[in-house]
Image (cartoon, rainbow, N blue to C red):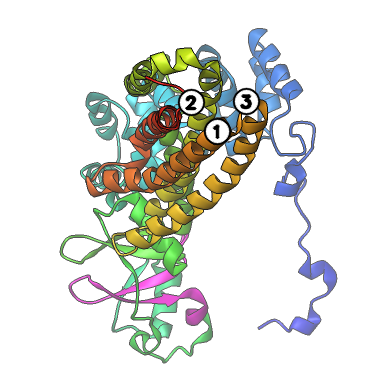
Amino acid sequence: MVDPGALDDETLVAEPQEDEVRPDDRIDDERHDEENRLKPEYVSAVEAALDAGDNGAVYELVEPLHPADIADLIELFDSDDRAKLASAITDLMTSDVVAELNDHVREVMMEALEPEAVATIAEQLETDDAVQLLEDLDEEDQKAIIAELEPETAEAVNSALAYPEETAGRLMNRHVMAVPEHMTIGNLIDYLREEGDLEHDFFEVFVIDAAHHPVGTCALNWILTTPRSVKLTDVMKRDQTLIPVTMDQEEVALMFQKYALISAAVVDESGRLVGQMTVDDIVHIISEEAGEDALLLSGAGDGDINEPIREAYSSRVRWLIANLGTAVVASAIIAFFGAAIEQLVALAVLMPIVASIGGNAGTQTMAVAVRAIATNQLTRANTRRILWKELRVALLNGGTVAVLIGIAAGFLYEPMMGAVIAAAMIINIAVAGLAGVLVPVIFERLDQDPAVASSVFVTMITDSMGFFAFLGLAVASGLVTM
């Protein structure tokens, strides 16, 4: 045992190696700006060397970069230059770089490589990363690559690909530190030192019974601070969160968030331990799901700047066509009141304001509702309460905006016009508040993603109701006649 008092400052502080690049050293250096992005002049230097065919200079420029930065650099080039860059940096194109690449970029690059080359990269990755590497490729390409893998890796990849996309079975790490429940702490420590697979990160040891069912967990700090003679069953934590292999990744992320998990056991249909999910996987899932929901609300599909033109067109145009159809409904209402609008030009001037404010109010409420549904904060148990709450918020917002627009319209035109547009504003914002909650809830009850089409229908409702309420009240008040 080392006496802590015998350690001086030089012993306690390890001197960094000459070639070591710490994270802080990458900020605002000759390659990175103050926000840790690659500087444009650095990217231009790499591009110039690549265009000149000077692969040695390219390699020298890229070599100091972290794998994640190399992936960022590749994504900054167009598809033709990406292949040239990958060829120029040869052995720098490690599995760590490939794992960090954008999905679309990685898919194109993997399709360009020979199966043997892809298999070599996959062998260096964790199973979940290897699966991510292969899952978007054609089935024929997948089979060719899997045939080149080591039998153990091939079996693990095939097993993962058998599960639906975006489920725990696809995403889990199959390297699990699991030991039988009859062990003592001393037995466990000896096992970890002599036979344990310590190449892979783990945060806790799973304790299993004879049927390979997880019965508890031991955190590493417990193991290191507990006497060797103590049995695992006496110190292990029996209350654990188990993740079914078929659970959707979004639900897995919610469980990690709710129970503040670092890792969790993944079990198959019979309750056997088959893998684990760790918090680093969850960070990626949360980021992916949050971005996906935001993009779906806008109808922008994947919303990836590296997405192929045809896929981007296909994912966006259908929602524009749907918007066109809903806009026709609003136009039909305007046409119905065409004679009234001809009598008073002020109606045509003011009615877009009612529809626009209502649309914005609906979008605000819808965004809150979609997020609440995604995080399990809005369920069947509290739908009525949330609906009533959002209606009251809408009425307060509507009343505030109605007073402002009513005074302005009354001053510019006449008092009755101010009263009409104020009443229409309150009605439309109230409807927007209801629609912003009800539309996503209805989609969720129909087992449809509430983020996909909610905006189209909420916009249709607020536009149509805005025009109808304003023009209808104008006729009812006697400002104009039909």
Label 1 residue SS:
helix
Side of 258 where 151 appears, left or right:
left
Q: Position of residue 482 (x, y in %)?
A: 37, 19
> Where does residue 359 sit, x and y in percent of width and height?
47, 34
Is 216 inside the magenta-drawn segment?
yes
Q: Residue at x 38, y 55 (%)?
A: 387
Q: Which residue is mark 1?
A: 416
Give the residue at mark 3. 413
Disc 2: CA contacts within 10 A as few (<14), some (14-19) or many (>=20): some
Q: How many numbered tags mark residues here? A: 3
Crowd class of label 1 (few under 14; some 14 to 19; many from 20; radius 10 Å): some
Name the residue tied to disc 2: 479
Q: Residue furthest front?
A: 478
**Residue 359 belongs to magenta span:** no
Give the mark nearer the N terminus: 2 vs 1: 1
Q: Amino acid at mark 1?
A: Met
Give the residue at x 48% y 54%: 280
The kind of secondary structure element at disc 3 is loop
Q: CA distance from mark 1 to mark 3?
A: 9 Å
Q: Is residue 173 visible?
A: no
Kindly report the distance in space between the C-alpha atoms of the residues bearing marks 2 and 1: 8 Å
Q: Quick check: marks 2 and 1 in contact, CB under 8 Å?
A: yes
Location of residue 263 (image quadrant) = bottom left
Q: Residue furthest top?
A: 52
Residue lying at 34% horizontally and 24% vertically, measured from the top left? 326
- What residue span does the magenta drawing correspond to? 197-223
Q: Amino acid at mark 2?
A: Leu
Whichever of labels 3 and 2 marks the residue nearer the N terminus, that label is: 3
Amino acid at pointer 3: Tyr
Contact, CB < 8 Å: mark 3 with mark 2?
no
